[in-house]
Image (cartoon, rainbow, N blue to C red):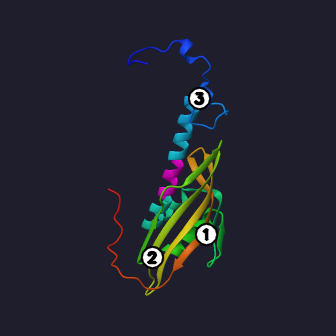
Amino acid sequence: MRPGAVCRPACNAGWDRRSHSSRTRGTPMTTLEQRLQRLEDESAIRALVARFADTCIRADHDGFKALWTDDGIWEIGAPFNLRRDGIEAIAALLHQLRDERNFFTQLVPTGVIVIEGDRAAARWPVRELATGPEDHYYDNVAMYSDTFVRTASGWRFSSRSYTYLWLNTEPFGGQSFGTPQLP
């Protein structure tokens, strides 16, 4: 078809728009509004995960609590085998894990998200590094498996489960320069 030409109905004969969408052949194409909502939901969930890492790095306990449902569950697997139920117990675990560290960072690349209405699930690879207290070292690669719920305040964690893939507690070099604050 030449540039600027208009495709008449005859050009579309036999073409089923639903089978040419980015979705699997034979499934109905969603509306623009539904696709936009899905993108907004995914963006909000990714931002929630980023805020989790940010609040942990900065030891922002109030900000951390705001990320969870009141009945949330936070699990950290073997070799530590920790589980906390409810927002107050979850917040206390962050204090326990974070407050005595000289340095802590959490790196979270992109993950896989599945959204079903007002609920979602996701999986994220994670890398963490920490030093302290004293001569303790912590370097790991893990996977977070999460569930989320949409609340009146936006998406919140209903559960996070941390599974270690690799863990090193041997000393490593480097120097900590503190955590920058937001402008």
Return the disc, 1 or 3, that comes first in the chain's sequence.
3
Q: Are marks 2 and 3 in contact (CB under 8 Å)?
A: no
**At numbered mark 1, what does the secondary structure look like: helix, strand or loop?**
strand
Looking at the rendering, the stretch of residues picked out in magenta corresponds to: 44-51
Which element is circle 2 on? strand
- Mark 1: which amino acid? Thr
In this view, the mark in front (2 or 3): 3
Q: Spatial distance from mark 2 to mark 3, Cα to Cα? A: 46 Å
176 or 55, which is in the foreground? 176
Q: Earlier in the sequence, mark 2 or mark 3?
A: 3
The answer to whether the residue labelled 1 contacts the one labelled 2, judged by CB atoms less than 8 Å apart, is: no
Q: Label 2 belongs to which residue?
A: 130
Amino acid type, callout 2: Ala
In the picture of the structure, the residue carrying the numbered disc 3 is 31
Above or below, 1 relative to 25: above
| C-alpha gap between disc 1 and disc 2 | 17 Å
Residue 101: x percent and y percent?
A: 45, 77
Q: Which residue is mark 1?
A: 163
How many labels sit on residues? 3
Cα distance, mark 1 to mark 3?
Answer: 37 Å
